[in-house]
Image: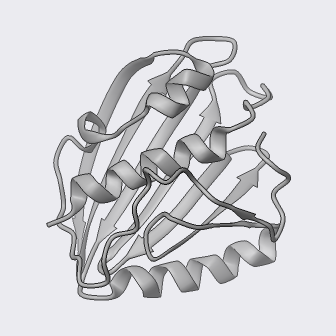
Amino acid sequence: MDAPLSSGTVRPSAAMATPSPSTSYRPLDALCARLDLRMVADLVGQSGDHRDVAAVSSGSTGSACAVTVGRLPGGVVVTVRADVGAPNSGRLMYEGLRQVQLGGGPVTELTGVGAAAYAYSDPIAGISVVTYDANLYLTVTAAPLRAGADLPDGLIAGLSATASSGLSALRA
């Protein structure tokens, strides 16, 4: 895995631009088709099947998709969840859920992805990158295709690049 998940900071590549504070986001069908998974594929192999799901709830619209990247034994399933809501709703979700995550284990602060971002590891769910900007709350998670398999070094940077491509795709 990348550097140990702690209170450290990971700085993704310069290609991951932070959107401006005046940016707003809109729901998007077929989100998976718009994601840049090249960095993840460089680590585990080429992309495979993908599935998109969209749901509307009171005050926000959620989109989710999953992509198989690579093959057994080292491949992963990348899941992306995008919640688009009222102005500044992304920050409210981010701050509330980040406090919950801090109680569950260490996080790694990320720079250059959205207004703020962090990564964390879960022994069952894999590695997640969480970010927000304006009215968007975005989570990108990679879980191994084979239960208990090790995830590759550099995966946080790959998921950060995928999150940045999601931010770009969802920008209104």
Which of 23/90 is in front? Answer: 23
- Residue 38 position in % (x across, y down): 44, 29
Figure quadrant of the N terminus = top right
Figure quadrant of the C terminus = bottom left
Which of 119/157 is in front? Answer: 157
At 44% from the left and 84% from the top, the residue drawn is 91
In the image, residue 17 sits, relative to residue 166, either above or below, namely: below
- Residue 2 position in % (x across, y down): 76, 44
Left or right: 92 as drawn, with respect to 126: left
Q: How many marks?
A: 0
Which residue sits furthest front?
Answer: 14
- Residue 121 position in % (x across, y down): 74, 53
In the image, residue 13 sits, relative to residue 99, either above or below, namely: above
Question: In the figure, residue 21 lies in which quadrant?
Answer: bottom left
At 23% from the left and 58% from the top, the residue drawn is 170
Which of 161/61 is in front? Answer: 161
Left or right: 123 as drawn, with respect to 18: right
Left or right: 55 as drawn, with respect to 148: left
At 63% from the left and 77% from the top, the residue drawn is 98
Residue 54 visible to the viewer: yes
Which residue sits furthest top?
Answer: 72
Residue 58 visible to the viewer: no
At 60% from the left and 46% from the top, the residue drawn is 157
- Residue 79 position in % (x across, y down): 47, 43
Left or right: 110 as drawn, with respect to 160: right
Question: In the figure, residue 18 lies in which quadrant?
Answer: bottom left
How are the colours assigned in the image?
Answer: one colour
Question: In the figure, residue 53 lies in which quadrant?
Answer: top left
In the image, residue 134 sits, relative to residue 62, either above or below, namely: below
